[in-house]
Image (tube, rainbow, N blue to C red):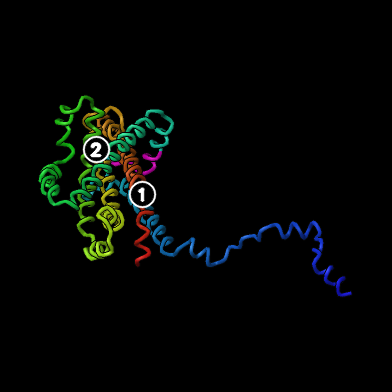
Amino acid sequence: MTQAVQTLSEEPIPLGQTEQSALSKDPAPTVTPGLLRRALHPDLLRSLGLGLLSLAAGVLFWHWASATNLNVFVNFENVPGPGKVFASFLGHLETEIFYTHIRVSMQRILISYSIAAALGIGLGLIMGRSRIVRAFVMPYIEVIRPIPAVAWIPLAILMWPTEEASIIYITFLGALFPIVLNTLHGVEQTPEVLVRAAQSLGASRLAIFAHVVLPAAMPSISAGLAIGMGVSWFSLLAGEIISGQYGIGYFTWNAYSLINYQDIVVGMLVIGFLGTASTAAIKLLTKPLLKWQKRTR
């Protein structure tokens, strides 16, 4: 009797097909109120709501000012309303040349900004760690940095063999200096106590640079990259207006030459959107490099 009970207890009890399928399936994930609250963070919703409210208020004021021909310090008599601008924008979406202007501008930004970011970060890091290099390079930066992009256009046309190269050069200069100076500032602000602690633990110079200096400078580098992107769009448009044949800056200037006010505003809004999107992309790309900030808070 005892052996029979043991035999029955050791043999697996066969399950039906329904039970086997039920056990093989993972339990369905449940969405709890806590998960929803974390996904829809109140601060994020509040910021998004305030931003949309601000944009809506701006569009309403724009519509009212243009409809009533407001002329108090600022004259809105010749400013087209949102409806006309939106209709003009929809019309340009059906033309191939409009996309060509956008593509050419984005291509110029990509080339010039990539060069400026690589050179600016590298030069800023070296200047931050070497007083000799900083003393040698800083006078050039302080002299060239205040020169506006428009002032570079005649000389850039003479220096470079093509107009395309001159526009990229002007855009490169606009993005370079914010990146260099912010990187330099970030390296200089590295806490000395962290460097000495790493030295006392026997870390090499390369290890200190990679694991102490560079992470500490990343917030300033990220800010410099974002600022440099905005300045690069400003410099690009200055070059396209004067010497370009394609590009969103040339599109806007050509609309002004033809007294096409709707297209002027269309070009301005497209420039603003592209600049905002590219800056947001830079912040998104650098965000993983700043995770240590959350852990230290």
Q: Residue furthest bottom?
A: 2
What kind of residue is marked 1? Ala
Circles 2 and 1: CB atoms closer than 8 Å: no
Residue 258 in the image: x percent, y percent? 27, 29
The overriding secondary structure of the stretch rendered in magenta is: helix
Q: Is residue 159 above or below residue 119?
A: above
Comes first in the chain, label 2 or label 1: 2
Q: Tell me, for residue 171, which label it has, or none.
A: 2
Q: Which residue is mark 1?
A: 280
What residue is shown at x 41% (from left), y 29% (from top)?
Answer: 95
Please report the residue visible at 42 percent of the width from the left and 36 percent of the height from the top.
90
- Magenta region, residue range: 79-86
Where is residue 38 drawn, in percent x and y? 48, 64
Report x, y in % for residue 225. Answer: 28, 48
Q: Is 72 on the left or on the right of 7, as rendered?
A: left
Given residues 275 and 139, the one toward you in this image is 139
Q: Is residue 223 left or right of residue 97?
A: left
Vertical relation: 225 (above or below) 156: below
Residue 10 lies in magenta, yes or no? Answer: no
Q: Quadrant of residue 256?
A: top left
Residue type highlighted by circle 2: Thr
